[in-house]
Image (cartoon, rainbow, N blue to C red):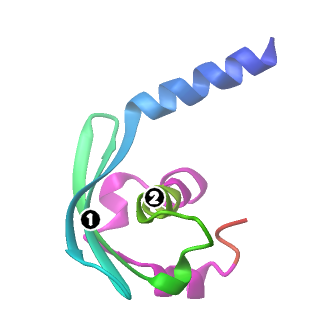
Amino acid sequence: MRKRSTQKQREERERKMGVEIVEELEQGPTFRFNVAVCQDDQCSMVEITFKQEHLRDGETTESFVQLVFEFLLEKQKKSADEIGESVDVEQLQTKFPDWRN
């Protein structure tokens, strides 16, 4: 019974939150993307910058971008507006060394 509730909560969260790459600005070894971050019917454009070495084996740029924003929105409890205009993964890793765990 509890599992259904968790699934329902996850679906609700996914409806309210969305992350979509809108534009590729730079492609490897440093990647830069414009990303639409939507939460509770409000969207913000955020530029994300990261390097090839931030990706794990088999990880796509899209899945990595999704992971970064899930961390910021869910674990750090930031709103789309609070994230700001840009995210530098190098700085994120310095501030939160175990952010992927």
Separation (CA) of disc 2 from disc 1? 10 Å
Residue 42, percent from left and from top: 25, 41
Identified at 37% across, 42% down, the residue is: 18
| Magenta-highlighted residues | 70-97
Closer to the camera, 21 or 1?
21
Residue 61, percent from left and from top: 42, 65
Q: Quadrant of residue 10?
A: top right
User: What is the magenta segment's predominant secondary structure?
Assistant: helix
As drawn, the residue found furthest toward the right would be: 1
Location of mark 2 (residue):
69
The reply to whether callout 2 and callout 1 are in contact (CB within 8 Å) is yes
Which of marks 1 and 2 precedes in the sequence? 1
In this rendering, the answer to whether 4 lies above or below 89 is above
Give the amino acid type for the residue marked by disc 2 in the picture: Phe
In this rendering, the answer to whether 85 lies above or below 2 is below
As drawn, the residue found furthest toward the front would be: 58
As drawn, the residue found furthest toward the top would be: 1
Please say whether residue 77 is one of the residues in the magenta stretch. yes
Residue 5, percent from left and from top: 69, 18
Identified at 34% across, 35% down, the residue is: 40
Identified at 55% across, 64% down, the residue is: 59
Closer to the camera, 25 or 16?
25
Location of mark 1 (residue):
46
Q: Secondary structure at mark 1?
A: strand
Horizontal relation, residue 32 to residue 17: left or right: left
Q: Secondary structure at mark 2?
A: helix
Mark 2 is surrounded, within 10 Å at the Cα level, by few (under 14), some (14 to 19) or many (20 or more) other residues, namely many
Horizontal relation, residue 75 to residue 13: left or right: right
